[in-house]
């Protein structure tokens, strides 16, 4: 089964090296989703159904000497994991926010984050259980260098980004550098496709205008065929070529003459011929 882009990004994040202890605490706060020490109210530090997030939390708690232990529960058709540790007082959440806001955002994204596939319209988000935790994450993201939008979904507060540059920046700040390269590569491919489409559409429109103009010239010349002898020789020659070869470009028409004509000369004679055709048709 192919992993989603979100799963790939999170897989890269959990494999990043652990930072200094203040950053480990900040990331653990982010993964926990709590505002206060969970051990004081008899809750685990981490509780989720993603084994790779639990592994990351276990490494963090091991580095922080919290002597972590894993508990497994079966709920309906899925397994849920929880991480418990020693009753060691953690630093305040505000202190961790000041020490390492990027690590706090990384932990929160691992727990409840989502990013759209690289080849789709970009969208990055973290859902939060309450507005207070959303304010903490919003502050952390602002300190990192981006200001998220806010919305509500099913009673939860969602922080999200919609600009490709902002998403690439926040992924880089969290440590998902390979994912940033994949996102930027897709941006280059998308831009090239758009340029090719614009060029093809422009060429198609130009060809349609040329063909429509040539067909109108041909129809008018056939209608005035019996009066072509009244115009100068050079215009008669151009009229003859235009009737026989309406699909020729100005360059091809110019090569038919002896001596050859430039595209500018062909265009000038064609304007004279069209003025004559218009006058003749109006005066009939």
Image (cartoon, helix red, strand yellow):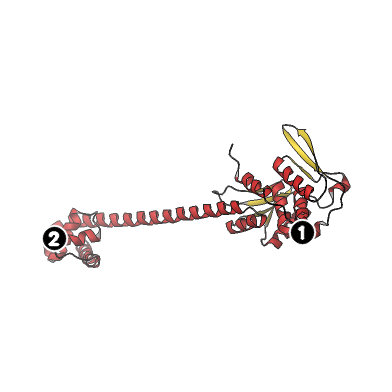
Q: Answer with left or right where residue 76 lies relative to residue 220.
A: right
**Residue on which disc 1 sits:** 97
Q: Position of residue 137 (x, y in %)?
A: 73, 56
- Label 1: which secondary element: helix
For residue 79, above or below residue 192: above
Q: Position of residue 53 (x, y in %)?
A: 71, 44
Are there few (<14), some (14-19), or many (20+) residues within 10 Å of tag 2?
A: few
Residue 274 or residue 102, whichever sits in front? 102
Q: Residue at x 32, y 55 (%)?
A: 207
Q: Nearer the viewer, mark 1 or mark 2?
A: 1
Residue 43 or residue 181, whichever sits in front? 181
Tell me the quarter of the picture where residue 217 sits: bottom left
Examine the rendering and report whether any part of residue 50 can be seen: no
Q: Position of residue 176 (x, y in %)?
A: 63, 52
Q: Residue at x 79, y 41 (%)?
A: 82
Are there few (<14), some (14-19), or many (20+) residues within 10 Å of tag 1?
A: many
Q: Which mark is residue 54?
A: none
Examine the rendering and report whether any part of residue 20 can be seen: yes
Q: Quadrant of the N terminus?
A: top right
Q: Residue furthest left?
A: 229
Q: How many marks?
A: 2
**Residue on which disc 2 sits:** 227
Q: Residue at x 78, y 36 (%)?
A: 72
- Label 2: which secondary element: helix
What separation in Å lies between label 1 and label 2 (alpha carbons)? Answer: 89 Å
Tell me the quarter of the picture where residue 219 sits: bottom left
């Amino acid at each position: 089964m192919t992993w989603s882009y979100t799963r790939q990004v999170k897989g890269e994040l959990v494999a990043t090296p652990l930072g200094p202890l203040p950053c480990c605490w900040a990331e653990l706060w982010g993964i926990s989703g709590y505002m206060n020490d969970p051990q004081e109210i008899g809750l685990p530090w981490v509780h989720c159904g993603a084994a790779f997030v639990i592994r990351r939390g276990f490494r963090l708690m091991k580095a922080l000497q919290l002597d972590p232990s894993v508990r497994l529960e079966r709920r309906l058709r899925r397994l849920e994991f929880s991480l418990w540790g020693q009753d060691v007082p953690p630093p305040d959440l505000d202190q961790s926010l000041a020490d390492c806001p990027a690590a706090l955002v990384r932990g929160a994204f691992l727990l409840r984050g989502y990013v759209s596939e690289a080849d789709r319209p970009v969208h990055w988000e973290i859902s939060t259980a309450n507005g207070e935790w959303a304010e903490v994450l919003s502050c952390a993201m602002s300190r990192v260098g981006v200001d998220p939008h806010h919305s509500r979904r099913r009673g939860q507060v969602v922080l999200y980004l919609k600009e490709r540059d902002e998403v690439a920046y926040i992924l880089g700040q969290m440590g998902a550098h390979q994912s940033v390269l994949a996102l930027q590569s897709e941006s280059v491919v998308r831009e090239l496709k758009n340029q090719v489409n614009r060029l093809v559409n422009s060429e198609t429109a130009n060809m349609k205008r040329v063909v429509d103009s040539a067909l109108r010239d041909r129809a008018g010349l056939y209608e005035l065929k019996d009066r072509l002898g009244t115009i100068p020789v050079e215009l008669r020659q151009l009229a003859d070529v235009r009737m026989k070869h309406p699909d020729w470009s100005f360059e091809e028409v110019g090569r038919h003459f002896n001596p050859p004509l430039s595209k500018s000369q062909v265009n000038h004679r064609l304007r004279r011929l069209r003025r004559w055709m218009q006058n003749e048709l109006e005066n009939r």
